[in-house]
Amino acid sequence: MSLLIPTYNDYTDAHEGSAQQEQYYKEWEKLKTKRNDQGRLEFPWDFEVVQGFFKQSDPNTNDEVFNYATDHMGRLKPWSEIISRLSEMNRSAPENVEYKLLFLARHGNGYHNFVVEKYGIEAWSAKYHSMEEVDGIRYAPDPELTELGIAQAEENHQFWVSELNEGAPIPSKFYVSPLQRSCKTLQITWKDLKPQDKHPLVVEKIRETIGLNLCDKRSSKSKINERFGKFGYNTDGITEEEDVYFTYDKRETMIEQSVRVNEFLQQLFESDCYTDGKVNKSLAEESTFISTHSHAGTIRCFLNVIKHRNFTISTGGMIPVVIKGTRRY
């Protein structure tokens, strides 16, 4: 039986905040015209979902019960067709357009998830979110995966073995949140599957919603290096030794988190361009398939930024999305 089945809390995480989503869209209309001191757009890329590749983007798919792990990732075509189609789309695209397939993975069940499930979301919001442990269960800051979380990552490992055997591409780049539940999920999922020369880049931009919930305070950069440097993780995406972004009295809004996720996507797509902003076709094709390991709130913001339908992701779950990026000047 699959362990990647969404719960009620997963559904709530994916669908709450519709008012903030609308506010973000209004904020985006301002950001997209903002220029720096050199007159260059700070957010030059527009993003949109490309339909026809995966069931998850279809509004008729019931996200409360859908399980990609028992449905070939939800793909509507064989991998050979997906790969060749994306390659052709990138080759024939205008000089300011490129396409990417992002695998947006959520960490497996962590001890903070266990506490929410055991004591309820009301008790979590009122009390437990700011604590380090309860009844001998240590869940903050930066909690580890539970046995269930490890098993979910192992199920993902076997799932990827199956998909790779059917022709799935190995992502050319791996990005991961600095929180250890995401780093560990990536390590288990891709053990012995990912080439050793593909070093996951640890980046702040795709960490979980910042502030208030102590479980979302990250460990020091040195501690992250100690835990995951031996697996080839690159922590150059972390600029500060300690978590200077976490706040104890205020939680990041969905609007603010969507902006930083947008910044991540801006950097990702811009990295495939020449200095004049035109897409380098060779780089675009080399970097078509991208893996991220992050969190429920982060994935919700990814989907918000690209205007994908809200979609429930279980702990340990994942959603593939094909994104069209169009660069403005």
Image: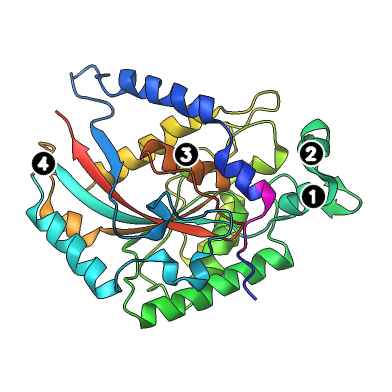
Q: Position of residue 62 (x, y in %)?
A: 51, 55
Q: Secondary structure at mark 1?
A: helix
Disc with the residue nearer the chain's start (3 vs 1): 1
Disc with the residue nearer the chain's start (4 vs 2): 2
Q: Which residue is mark 1?
A: 115
Going by the numbered disc 1, the residue's amino acid type is Val
In this rendering, the label closer to the viewer, 4 or 2? 2
Q: CA distance from mark 3 to mark 1?
A: 24 Å
- What is the number of the mark on residue 301? 3
Q: Which residue is mark 2?
A: 124
Judged from this view, the residue extending furthest toward the front is: 60
Q: Are marks 2 and 1 in contact (CB under 8 Å)?
A: yes
Horizontal side, residue 269 vs residue 144: left or right: left
Question: Magenta segment, which residues?
Answer: 5-9
Q: CA distance from mark 3 to mark 2?
A: 22 Å
Q: Secondary structure at mark 4?
A: loop
Q: Which residue is mark 4?
A: 278
Q: Quadrant of the C terminus?
A: top left
Q: Are marks 3 and 4 in contact (CB under 8 Å)?
A: no
Q: Quadrant of the N terminus?
A: bottom right
In this rendering, the label closer to the viewer, 3 or 4? 3
Q: Position of residue 177 (x, y in %)?
A: 51, 49
Q: Position of residue 159 (x, y in %)?
A: 49, 75
Name the one closer to the observer, 58 or 284.
Answer: 58
Disc with the residue nearer the chain's start (2 vs 1): 1
Judged from this view, the residue extending furthest toward the right is: 135
Q: Determine the residue positioned at 70% across, 36% down.
A: 213
Name the chief secondary structure element in magenta.
Answer: loop
